[in-house]
Image: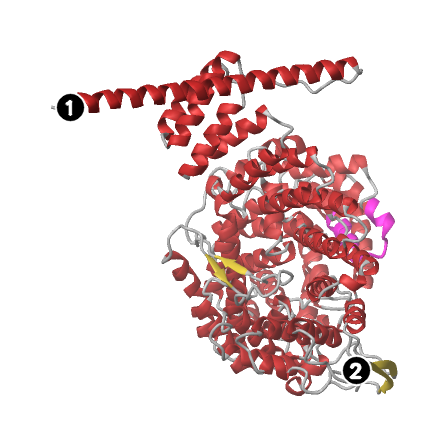
Amino acid sequence: MEEPEQILQGELEEEEEEEEDHGVTEKVNEFFTELDIEQEQRRRRLRSEGIRAPRRRSVLPSHLHSVMGSANLTLARGDTSGAIELCMEVIRQAPHVIEPFLTLATIYEDLGKKEKLLQILLICAYLKQSDINVWCKAAELAIELTQLHIGEQCFKKAYALDKSNYSLLWRRASILQEMGQFKNAIDCYTALRECLPDGSGPDFIEVTKELSRIYHQQLDDVKAIDLLQDSFDKYSDHFDDEAVNILSELLISSRQFENAFELLTNYYELSKDTTTTTTPPPPTSTANASTTANASTTEPFSISTALSLSMGASDELGQSISEITGLTGLTGEESTQPKVTIDEIPESVPVDIRAKLVVCMIQLKYILPKNTLLALTSFPESYGDLILDVAEAFMENAEYSKALPLLTTLTETKEFSQAGVWLKHAECLHMLNELEPAALSYSKVLSLAPHHTETRMILASLYSQLGMTEDALALLDAEDNLYSSQDDEETVLPMEPPVPQKSPARASKSKSSRRGTSSLKKSVTFAESSELAPALSQDVRLLLTKFMLLVGEERVKEYVDVGVEMLLFFFRQYYDIKDIREYIGLSDKSIRMKLRKFFPDEDKSLKEQEKFINVDEWWKVFYMTCKGLYKLGQYDSLIHLIFCADISKKLEAHRKELLLLASSASLLTADDSLFHFIRLLYFKKSDFPLFWNLFNCMAPLQRQHKFILRQLIKNPSIMPLVRLSANYSLLSSSYKFALAQYELAYREDPNDHLLCLCIAVVYLQMVLQKHTLKKNTLVIQAVGFLHKYFNIRGPCQESYYNVGRFFHQLGLLHIACHYYKMVLSTDPDNLRHDSNAKMVYPSLTHEAAFNLGLIYNQSGNRPLALHYMWHYCRI
């Protein structure tokens, strides 16, 4: 048991502590009471002077002063949980008082609970919005917690309280730039430039650099250049290497090489030497492609240039490389131009600036100082991106022989031996006509980036030019297997080497080739096509290259399969329509537009396809595929393909050719849609003989004759329609109508031998009718027109045979035999010497001999009939 003295002493100590606590609490209460009294007195004094004092949002009630004091004492003793409970009690009773929140902020800051501290600081800033320190502290903490939007708003509030503190606006602008809100960041940086004092040159330059970077990201280099040049004019003494680097890079990207060159030479005080030289005229003769490829090429390398070099630019794919790369368009005049050079570039100039200076001199055709590129090529691992810029400048100016060693140096490094560098290396070799090394470089590109479509196309064309057609086709077929072996996720393949981040002004030039899923060999429905269009477009370009290779090799079956595969994608909205023939007869425009409403994205689809293959190339594929289907005898597929092209508007630019092709195919297959195509072709292009030949080849249908009569009523001066109507009347035994129409055409062209013959035939048919009156007169008229026909046509097998056949039909056999024998005695080659004949006519010897045999056989002279039949008609 404890002794009574110890117990008594402990009780006395507790009583003393309670008295001390009570005394402290009373002092705290007295302090707050006095503070309230002083504030009230100050408010009254200001009111009496006519000044309105700022109103406090809230005041801690007097009965809570002791509770708040207890919370502070509890915190001082280290009891954070007790202090938090007391602060929460104060907040519950007086939520608009700032004192408990400040205490909680101190507690959470000591505990390291930054998320809760941020919440408390935001509440404190709300309760006391005039306290700039609280806003800044909350902003810094929000940025530390990566809550940039909260930090930006806090700095906005802080800057509103102190407009003279431009560092707050600067911080807000940098946060907006980091958040990607470039428009607001531009506004902040612009306001910051205006509020900076006159003596703050370095700050002005820094703000301008950040603002120019934002404009460059927004693809507005003009404003970025104007800002930097304005800053250079205003604070040239404070312009540093980084600012010069940014401005020169913007000028180079904007193709302002002369301004960039002047900027660099003036800033680094480089001495220039200018001399004038006279350039002799270029040779007018075309040299060998292998020796003039570098000199004759005046434009930078591109995919179309590579394909034209590899495959040829003609439709038959047979144009040689020397014809394509020959010297053309060169004048024979001498040119005088200044040659500018720099004595020496000091080593104090940064390497980035030195590379940009070299690029400008290359673009301006200036003379480079000696050993200029030695500092770059000595350290390719460190300055690989700069070497690549210089090589690209050489390539843009067609100096491929100078760019090739630089690119070769990069390919030998580990970091820059990327697909993009190898692609440039291959392009240089290709333009220098070194085809086999170029093919090896392109193969290296495909090994690093197997989904790069353009490279695969060019390499296949190179293989074809080198005589390796099978390798080219295998390369194009490997693309489908490559796509099918991948999953459905989209991957990005780098086409350029990584650029070291040595300067904020240096941006990476990454290009990517996205992989798609090959689906052309499957049946693509309309719903799936819009989703697979980007992937299909890559396959279509590869298939186009394969198609052209197969056409050049005349492998009909294979290029037809590839062509149908491509057109399945091109006409994917219509290819699967089973009753497609029902839409062919729709001539009303409104009905056809209703049909197209089922496919509302056809315009968008066509525009997307034109980005990769233009309409003329699609028409060439369509025409060659139809031609191949005709050779293979696949008429059903031919008609279906033509019908798809007819109801679609994708080949509207070749509408007349399409209708002509459709008419020929319908005539070939005896399709019922022939009349529809002929009618459309009549309204499109009825002024050339081939159309009227197709029109005349149609079967003499009643609806055709009705169409002809309707058109004659509208325009009776169209003579081909008059002749066709007369032919139809002659075939239908309406001889009077036929005679009237033939005579109408005869008045327009009395020297047409065919019209004379037709009129003679009509008179002959009228004579042969049973109830015809005045037959002798009709015979005389018929013989008269026949005689005129013979005089116009001249002596030949055709005229002799037609006259003989006329008298044979009339029953004057002795005259018919005379003309038939004239046919047998006339050389059939006489027709070939006719200047008006545009084709070779067949011989009529067999027909004349056969008719002679019939006449002699009917007259009883069988031996003579056998003589003619045996001598002329034996097979």
Q: Say left or right for 703 vs 141.
A: right
Q: Say left or right for 839 vs 835.
A: left
Numbered disc in front, either 1 or 2:
1
Residue 360: x %, y % from top left: 74, 73
Residue kind at label 2, given as amino acid type: Thr
Instruction: Looking at the picture, tell me which residue is in the foreground, 630 or 554.
Output: 554
Q: Are marks 1 and 2 in contact (CB under 8 Å)?
A: no
Residue 412: x %, y % from top left: 49, 80
Dominant secondary-structure state across the stretch colored magenta: helix
Disc with the residue nearer the chain's start (1 vs 2): 1
Residue under the image location 87 percent in, 48 percent down:
747
* Vertical placement of residue 642 versus 328, above or below: above
User: Circle 1 — which element?
Assistant: loop
Q: Is residue 748 magenta?
A: yes
Residue under the image location 76 percent in, 62 percent down:
238
From this viewpoint, is residue 100 visible?
yes
Crowdedness of circle 2 by 10 Å Cα count: few (<14), some, many (20+)? some
Question: For mark 1, what is the residue?
Answer: 3
Residue 491: x %, y % from top left: 45, 55
Q: Is residue 601 magenta?
A: no
Q: For the magenta stretch, what is the residue range?
A: 744-762
Q: How many marks?
A: 2
User: Circle 2 — which element?
Assistant: strand
Disc marking residue 492: none
Disc marking residue 341: 2
Crowdedness of circle 1 by 10 Å Cα count: few (<14), some, many (20+)? few
Residue kind at label 1, given as amino acid type: Glu
Residue 745: x %, y % from top left: 82, 47
Q: Quadrant of residue 341?
A: bottom right
